[in-house]
Amino acid sequence: MYIFKINKIALILFLITFSKQSFATFEDVFSDCIFERVKVVDKTQTLQKIESYCEKQVVKNEIGNGSLGAISQRLIQERKTEFNPYVITPHKMNYVLPVIVTDGINAQVYDNESNWPSKLKDIETKFQLSIKLPLTFGSILNTGDQLYFAFTLKSWWQLYTHSLSRPFRETNYQPEFFYFTPINWHPFKGNSALRFGFEHQSNGLAQAKLLSRSWNRIYVDFLYEKNNFALSFRPWYRIPEGDKRTTQEESGNDNPDITDYMGYFELSMAYKWHEDFEVTMQTRRNFATSHGALELGVTFPLWGRLRGYAQYFNGYGESLIDYNYRQQKIGIGFALTSRL
């Protein structure tokens, strides 16, 4: 804890503010807030407290509400570092599950891969890495809005299959562009926002035609938060690719019936409990075919910054290669970042 040197800090902040460009970034508004706050607070106030006040104040002005929830708290942390070249901003949850077990590996899909079907094991390793990058500075159409590029990689590794030299059974690549904006709607005294995006998802197996999987979607995502609870409702529209199936002889649509199993929306919820635990749920559904999926997760403290993560999955489409294959899976490992 240290005491202000008000005159020196005021001079520094004046120089920072004067040198800024005309558009208002988080840092611009944050610096202005500190500059103004220095003039009115008690001289014994610490810099840490003033920074914390201004961080929250900037986000409160963006969302139009004085109450900050779990998503807003994450937004504060991201806005502080998203233009720092030495900091990678997470998008979706990042995790490693050294052990994930299924009640039946989807072996038959690899019938053309020589001896794979008979040697694949029901135990493997799974991990997900997901990052995002802001593409715009300041506001575009609304206070606090922003355009992003994001990339998510999810992989299933047959780490325990010695006889196959431990291959990566499946890897899914998901680049996306999306626009995020807070909205001035506060049901039940919570906060809400919207995301509009385009995403491509593929397993990158264009050379192995019968194993290739891909699709393109546009989506709108409604986000809601209140205190430690967050909700996401994300319906999508699949961009048509035709109904002709891929064969050994020629390329067509890798998976024309994918929405029969993956559905047309995703509903996600997350809740932080006692700051040490986070419980998540994600579900998809196609009511016409009665196909879908449910994923449950919980993070818990281990030691230091390391957190444990347990995941349960039941349904179709845990990976793209398994989009029309139903299974149950349970895994245990480590969370590199939380969902909230």
Image (tube, grey):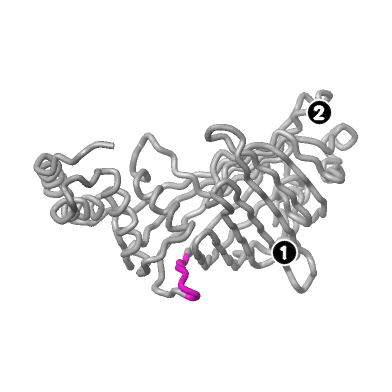
In the picture, the disc for residue 320 is none
Element class at badge 2: loop
Which residue position is annotated with label 2?
Answer: 161
Please tell me whether residue 190 belongs to the stretch shown in magenta: yes
Q: Is residue 181 left or right of residue 42?
A: right
Element class at badge 1: loop
Magenta span of residues: 187-194
* Residue type highlighted by circle 2: Thr
Q: Is residue 229 left or right of residue 148?
A: right
**Closest to the observer: 309 or 126?**
309
Q: What count of labels does the image hold? A: 2
Residue 282 lies in what quarter of the image?
Answer: bottom right
Which residue position is annotated with label 1?
Answer: 243
Residue 89 lies in what quarter of the image?
Answer: top left
Residue 158 lies in what quarter of the image?
Answer: top right
- Answer few, some or many: residues within 10 Å of disc 1's Cα (few below 14, many 20 plus, some between 14 and 19): few
Q: Residue at x 37, y 69 (%)?
A: 65
